[in-house]
Amino acid sequence: MKILDKSYDPKPVEERWSRFWIEAGLFTPEVPSAKPKFSLVLPPPNVTGSLHMGHALCFTLPDIISRWKRMKGYNVLWLPGTDHASIAVHNVIEQSLKEKGLSRETLGREEFLKVAWEWKRKYGGIITGQLKKLGCSLDWTRERFTMDEGFSRAVRLVFVSLYKEGLIYRDYYLVNRCPRCNTVLSDIEIEHKELQGKLHYIKYPVLEGESTIVVATTRPETMLGDTAVAVHPDDERYKSFHGKTLVLPLVNRKIPVITDSRVEKDFGTGAVKVTPAHDPVDFELGKLHGLEQVIVIDGSGKMTEAAGAEFQGLDRFECRRRVVERLREQGLLIKVEDYPHMVGHHDRCKTVIEPHLSWQWFVKMAPLAKEAIRVVEDGTIQFIPANWAKSYFEWMYNIHDWCISRQLWWGHRIPAWFCRPCGEIIVAMETPARCPKCGGGELVQDEDVLDTWFSSALWPFGTMGWPEKTVDLEMFYPTDLMGTAFDIIFFWVARMIMMGLKFMGEIPFRQVFINGLVRDFRRRKMSKSEGNIIDPLEMIEKYGTDALRFTVAALAIPGMDLSLSEERMLGYRAFVNKIWNASRFVLMNLDEEPASIAESELTLADRWIRSRLARITAELEAALDQYKFYEAAEKIYHFVWHEFCDWYIEMAKPSLQAGNRTTQAVLAGALDHILKLLNPFMPFVTEEIWSHLPGHGRSLVTAAFPKSEAADVNPHAEEEMSLLQALVVEVRTIRAENKISPQKKTAILLKAPGEKEKGFIPEIRAYILALANGSEVRVEDRFPPEARLLKGVAGSWEVAIPLEGEGDLEAERARLEKEIKKVEAEIEKLEGRLQKKAFLERAPGPIIEEAKQSLLGCRDKKAKLQKSLDNIKA
């Protein structure tokens, strides 16, 4: 039998097994199949992206479920793919062009798209390679891309169908735009930051008379586009101004005073400027009151001709400075106050976004939302944790139409053409030759592309071949699980539900598992500026993939953020090593010919480990069934380390040395069982070890997941074992606390709580002697009063170890008293620090917490030392 290497080296093992699984087609489901199906689609990462810790979490958890279900006998499809990520690709390419002194405008659309496709070919495989490195059991024979030919056809058909139903329309509307990237942005692409701004108080003169109205604004540059000033109709301060006309400073345009109940009387002066072309609230006010829309800032953040000759062409922030300067010169600036407020930024390039009035394409969402709300309300689709359904409903009940056009080139170009002679808009699957209205041939296609989320909304069914009626759609749709982050519940999950119901007539998935965010150990968001980013690829290189996977699983409480540290990864790398070393011991003690179990030869340890395996299997499956990854990981971790390795292997050694073939069979069976339980979490190390077991199969990927055998559950063995563990732990504690040499054998005295309990001792006596280094075990009705004893308690049992010699006793007393004084000094020091107000106010949270934990540790240590001292004095 080939023995495992002395130490585990993850890299060659991971490369070998990753290649084997894919080449053997083990992740490709059977078609057709009589097995029950389990299907899910991978949330598509950006095609030019690279694995980050959020990916590691989001992809590891569904992989655990996929591997578990596959071993449970399901026909599993986990379908991979990547997203074309319009803005992300534009950013990287435009940065590259900038370094060469070029821009997308100088390159032109056709050449830019050539560069983009080449970029995709060159870098698109990086993320897929990293997914394989992570051990994701994806069916790579079905890999899709949101801009591949079939998927693009599906996107176009959805657009055309919705347009023909009147659910897609074109409108002149105020949208969020990035002046740097020159495109409209969705809400999810906007990051709101609190900035220390300025509130400017400006006088607006009344046309007739000497009076003025003072308005307050954080954006004085937009006043050049004001077309009214609004006050609350019930604000007594401005009753006399109702219906008056004002003169707009610097521009001299006549603007009315209007009343509207949405004006906040307590903000600023209670009078607000209305700029319909540059503020969302003002845009709605303008529509209601029939106000003119004056565009003074263009899509690039530059001032337009409408802003006036002095300001035309200026950057918006430079214009702000100039406007304030002119107002001050003309005596129209009353005062300027500091004013912190939230400002939207493009999450990629960090540019301050600009509300921009332009022609855009929209989807009417209310008709699509109705059914999507129902399927969550009635439980057809289940959110895990359930509280995230509330967030879903909040968005869905207050849904707005969706702006789907983007001023970019890389993406699905909108299939709409404009007829120059007559202005007709033609929306079609194929490029039209002539205008159906006037017969003209001068047709120009819309320059915009669709929002990336539009194509992503079709992902669950578009990846399976829709609009064709494919075998995959018949077998695997709807899918069973969608795992994703909470921040895209509306932007992606809700839209997938709406589109699935609309075009498939069915929900796209049955359950939605919501991940938390990955934060550092201080619960801060990971960012380059904080210097706290943990790179999963670096962690894989240092600790191996299995340690990374187990770490995120152990921390994954549904819906809650993870506090991650490299120390946790190191700890679970030690767990991998523990499994390896324990397995190496087992394999070294197995014969080539597998042993069989003779029930009559089962030891207490054998009966106990079989019982515990049955229980832990049921508990682990129950946890996975509820997506409690943290609970499943914790249970298997403690079982393997603290029960199998620390207790069973140690207790099996004498039986193995005596040539007990039944213990050998139980040991081999237990290891096989454990490797299968661990495999969904740690696929690489378990596969490598399992391939060395006698009688192993082709791969753990397709091996049967262990069953919890009710016949193996043995409460009596577990009760006996619990007593044995409690007694051994207490004896070891007494020995350690009293510095008794590990090599020195001591007598062990026990006092049972009753006659029944005494009956346990004959079967566990040999184990106590071996595990607690005892010379003898005596059960006493009462301990000898004249004896010098070190005493302890194990549940309802009393435990004692005799001390030998007066010198020993006196020396031990002196040592304990000295140790207690030392600990008391440390307690006094820590208590003093924690009582200081300055320390509590200035020290970082983790330092304060560390001091508190140290104090608790010292108090606990003192209690144990005092107990040992009292035992001696007694």
Image (tube, rainbow, N blue to C red):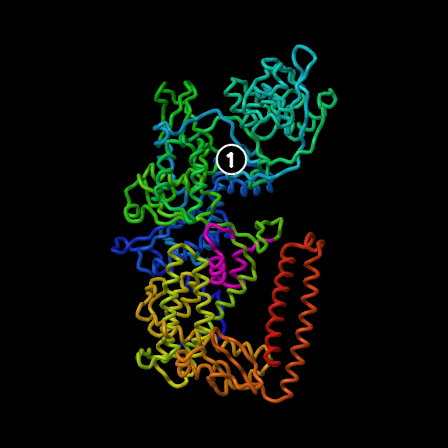
Residue 284 at what x, y percent from top left? Answer: 51, 24
| Quadrant of the image occupied by residue 635 | bottom left
Residue name at image x 47 percent, y 48 percent:
124
* Residue where numbered disc 1 is placed: 185
Q: Amino acid at mark 1?
A: Leu
Residue 651 at what x, y percent from top left? Answer: 43, 79
Q: Residue furthest top?
A: 208
| Quadrant of the image occupied by residue 18 | bottom left
Q: Which of these two is toward me, 839 or 463?
A: 839
Q: Is residue 7 above or below residue 139?
A: below
The part of the chain drawn in magenta is 532-561
Quarter of the figure with the C terminus: bottom right
Q: Residue furthest bottom?
A: 805
Q: Is residue 333 above or below residue 183?
A: above
In magenta segment, residue 552: yes
In magenta segment, residue 98: no
Mark 1 crowd level (few <14, some 14–19, many ≥20, 10 Å Cα): many
Residue 602 at what x, y percent from top left? Answer: 34, 79
Total of numbered circles in the picture?
1
Quarter of the figure with the N terminus: bottom left
Using the rendered image of the protein, determine whether residue 133 is visible from the camera's viewpoint.
no
| Quadrant of the image occupied by residue 692 | bottom left
Secondary structure that dominates the magenta span: helix
Q: Is residue 451 above or below residue 781?
A: above
Residue 593 at what x, y percent from top left? Answer: 33, 79
Residue name at image x 65 percent, y 31 percent:
317
Residue name at image x 34 percent, y 63 percent:
705
